Amino acid sequence: MAIDRSPAALAALKPVIRTWARELGLADLGFAPVELGEAEQRLMDWLAAGYHGNMDYMARHGATRARPAELLPGTLSVITARLDYPPPGPEAWANLAAPLRAYVSRYALGRDYHKPLRARLKRLAQRMEREWGPFAWRPFTDSAPVLEVELARLGGLGWEGKHSLLLNRSGSWFFLGELYTALPFPPDPPVEAHCGTCQACLDICPTRAILGPGLVDARRCISYLTIEHPGPIPTDLRPLLGNRIYGCDDCQLACPWNRFARHEGLADFRPVHGLDQANLVDLFAWSEDEFLARLEGSAIRRIGHERWLRNIAVALGNAPPSPAVRASLEARADHPSALVREHLQWALSRQAPPP
C-alpha cells in the first residue's frame, strides 16, 4: 500500500501520529519544513566567530546542519519530538549553594537519553509504515549534524529562548529528537516567542557565556567546558565553575517559564547513584573502574574518567579550605594524567592554609 502524499491526506494523518507518539511516551510532536531560512547564515556566522571552541565537528559538517536533505537525501519534512525529563526541585539551588556537593546537570542525573528517544522515534516510524506502507525515514537524537532547536521552533514545539534553548509555556526540561521523512507533511505554524524583556538567563550565567539573545560563546559555557572541552579549563574561568562538575542549569533554573514545569518525565531519567546529592570528595575517590561501573548507561560516562577528575578537581579547588578536601587532592598527586595533575595542583594552591 502506498501513502497518499497529497497535502490534505498527510495533514489528516498528523493527529493520528501525535496520538501514537503520546502512547510511546513522547510529550509532543511538531512537523517542520526542510527549508531553514536564515538559520544557516546564523550558524555560519557563529562558526566564523569561533564560538564553537574545540567542537571541530560543528565546523566540519558546516551547512549540512541547516540542510536536512543533504543529511538524508530525499527528506521532505521533519517530525520533531519532545521527551520530558523530571524538572529539578528546590534541591538544585541547595546543591549549588553547598560547595562540597557536586552539581550535575539535571538532564544527566538518570539514564542517557539518546537510546530511549531514538528507539521511540524508530517505533513511531515503524508503526506508520505498518499502517500506511513504506517510506524513507531516519531518527536522530543529537547524533548527527541537525539544527534541532530551529527545527523544533519551525515545527511549533516552542520558541528559541535567549539562552538558545527551546522554550515553551511548560518550560525547557525536555530532550529533542527528529525523524527525517520522505513525506511532505505540511508544516505546523511556529509559536510566537514569549521572553519579552526578560533577561534572567543572561544575568545569571556564571561565566557570561550568553553574549546576547540566542548567542552563546561555547568557549565560556560551563556545559561546554565540563563536557565537550578536552583540554585544560582556562584558569580565569575555573573559579566561576563553582561546584558544577557536569554541565550547568543556571539559565534554565532562572527562567520564569520553568516555574510552570509540572510534568514528571519518564522514570528512566530520575536520579541514580545519589548523583543529585553527591559529595565531591566521594566522587573524586572513584577509580576508573568504579566510574565506568557506576555510570553504566549514563551520559556522563562519555567524558571519561580523566575529564571527570579534572572537573571535580576544579570544584574541590573552589570549596572552602579543609583537611578533608586537601587530603582528597593529595591522594591523587601522582595521577598519570598531566591534565589531571595540573588541575589538581591548581586546586591544592587554593586549598593552602593561610600563612
Image (spheres, helix red, strand yellow):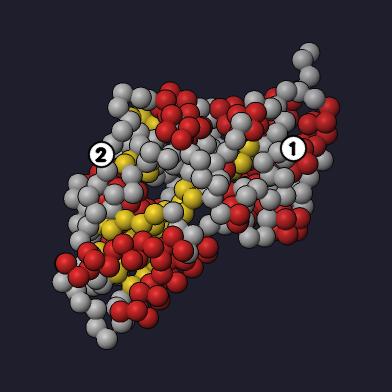
Comes first in the chain, label 1 or label 2: 2
Label 1 secondary element: loop
Q: Residue furthest bottom?
A: 1
On the image, the x and y values in percent for residue 121 come to 42, 66
Q: Is residue 156 above or below residue 207?
A: below
Q: Circle 2: is it few (<14), some (14-19), or many (20+) Cα within 10 Å? A: few
The quarter of the displayed image where residue 235 is located: top right
Residue 47 visible within the image: no
Q: Nearer the viewer, residue 178 or 279?
A: 178
On the image, the x and y values in percent for residue 94 come to 65, 28
Identify the residue shown where x is 35% and y is 66%: 17
Residue at numbered disc 2: 192
Amino acid marked by disc 1: Asn
On the image, the x and y values in percent for residue 218 come to 43, 40
| Quadrant that contains the N terminus | bottom left
- Depth check, mark 1 against mark 2: the one in front is 2
Amino acid marked by disc 2: Glu
On the image, the x and y values in percent for residue 314 come to 65, 34
Q: Nearer the viewer, residue 157 or 94?
A: 157
Residue at numbered disc 1: 279
| Quadrant that contains the C terminus | top right
Question: Left or right of 66: which side holds 229?
Answer: right
Identify the residue shown where x is 54% and y is 41%: 87
Q: Circle 1: is it few (<14), some (14-19), or many (20+) Cα within 10 Å? A: some
User: Alpha-carbon distance for marks 1 and 2?
Assistant: 42 Å
Question: Left or right of 255: which side holds 236?
Answer: right
Residue 3 visible within the image: yes
